[in-house]
Image (spheres, helix red, strand yellow):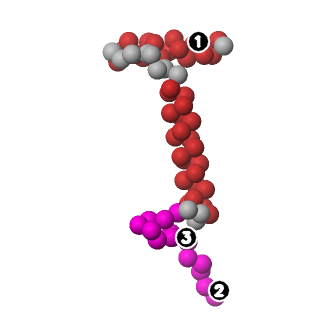
């Protein structure tokens, strides 16, 4: 609870400095969580090739021929 109050205080000070409303200060954590989920999904798609498409074409890494 102390951490939440400190975070609210920090957001209130930032809102005063930027002349904006602190009404939705709690949405910042949801935005951070959303960015983290998008980043993790991007890494998974890049590494596995799962669901990785561009203009309808699959972008899986080509399998290198055995030498």
The residue indicated by pointer 3 is 60
The residue mark sitting in front, 1 or 2, is 1
N-term mark: 3 or 2: 3
Magenta span contains residue 56: yes
* Kind of element beneath mark 2: loop
Up-down: is 58 above or below 33?
A: below
Q: Tag on residue 57?
A: none
Query: For the residues marked 1 and 2, what is the alpha-carbon distance in whole angstroms?
Result: 60 Å
Q: Indicate the position of residue 24 as horizontal and vertical percent values.
A: 46, 20
At x 50%, y 15%, the residue is 10
Q: Residues within 10 Å of mark 1 (few under 14, many from 20)?
A: few
* Kind of element beneath mark 3: loop
Q: Tag on residue 66?
A: 2
Up-down: is 11 above or below 27?
A: above
At x 45%, y 16%, the residue is 23
Residue situated furthest left in the rendering: 19
* Kind of element beneath mark 1: helix
Left or right of residue 64: residue 20: left
Q: Indicate the position of residue 53 as horizontal and vertical percent values.
A: 49, 65
Q: In front: 53, or 36?
A: 53
Query: For the residues marked 1 and 3, what is the alpha-carbon distance in whole angstroms?
Result: 47 Å
């Amino acid at each position: 609870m102390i951490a939440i109050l400190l975070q609210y205080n920090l957001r209130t000070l930032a809102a005063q400095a930027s002349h904006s409303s602190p009404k939705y200060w709690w949405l910042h954590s949801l935005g951070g969580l959303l960015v983290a989920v998008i980043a993790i999904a991007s890494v998974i798609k890049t590494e596995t090739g799962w669901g990785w498409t561009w203009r309808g074409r699959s972008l899986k890494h080509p399998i290198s021929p055995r030498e």
